[in-house]
Image: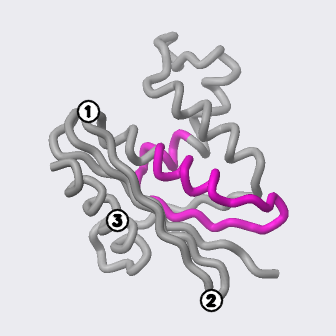
Amino acid sequence: MDKIIIYTDGGCRGNPGIGGWGVWLRYGDHDKKLKGSEKDTTNNRMELTAAIKALEAIKSSTIDIDLYTDSKYVMSGINEWIKGWKLRGWKTANKKPVKNVDLWQQLDEVNTKHNVHWYWVKGHSGDIGNDMADELANQAMDKLS
């Protein structure tokens, strides 16, 4: 069975500062590139936004998805931390409110609609998909700069 391959990246110039996110989706011979930016944001918010926008762009819930991110924050959050946060009413183990809870809740919602396999890839390491997502994020930031 075919699967959708997704690469996501987010970045910020200043943290907080001008931020951008990029997504490269591939399905067979088809590909789609998405990007966006915000004026006053953080790296982590842009990484989360990239993953959300990628999964929102997929209409079918029956196709497997391999999603690659260079964000250990996103990887750890979606694979480990989120279960505990939800059990504790979106609080950390230290009983503090989860940072970026609005985006984590959005990501949780779109992630549960799909069969997503999450993978971490080292950023700026020559991975063609990560490089493309990074380029898209930088293009989005350039428009605001």
Residue receiving disc 1: 40
Tag 3 and tag 1, C-beta contact below 8 Å: no
Q: CA–CA distance between discs 3 and 1?
A: 18 Å
Which of the two discs, 2 and 3, labels the residue nearer the N terminus? 2
Which numbered circle lies on residue 29? 2
Task: Tell me which corner region of the image, top left, top right, bottom left or bottom right, holds residue 131.
Answer: bottom left
Give coordinates of residue 47: x percent, y percent.
41, 48
In the drawing, does residue 82 fall left or right of residue 69? Answer: right
Residue under the point 39% across and 66% down: 133
Q: Amino acid at mark 2?
A: Asp
Residue under the point 75% across and 45% down: 112
Q: Looking at the image, is 2 positioned above or below residue 76?
A: below
Residue 67 lies in the magenta-colored region: yes
Q: CA–CA distance between discs 1 and 2?
A: 36 Å
Residue receiving disc 3: 136
Q: Amino acid at mark 3?
A: Leu
Q: Amino acid at mark 1?
A: Asp
Residue 70 in sight in this render: no
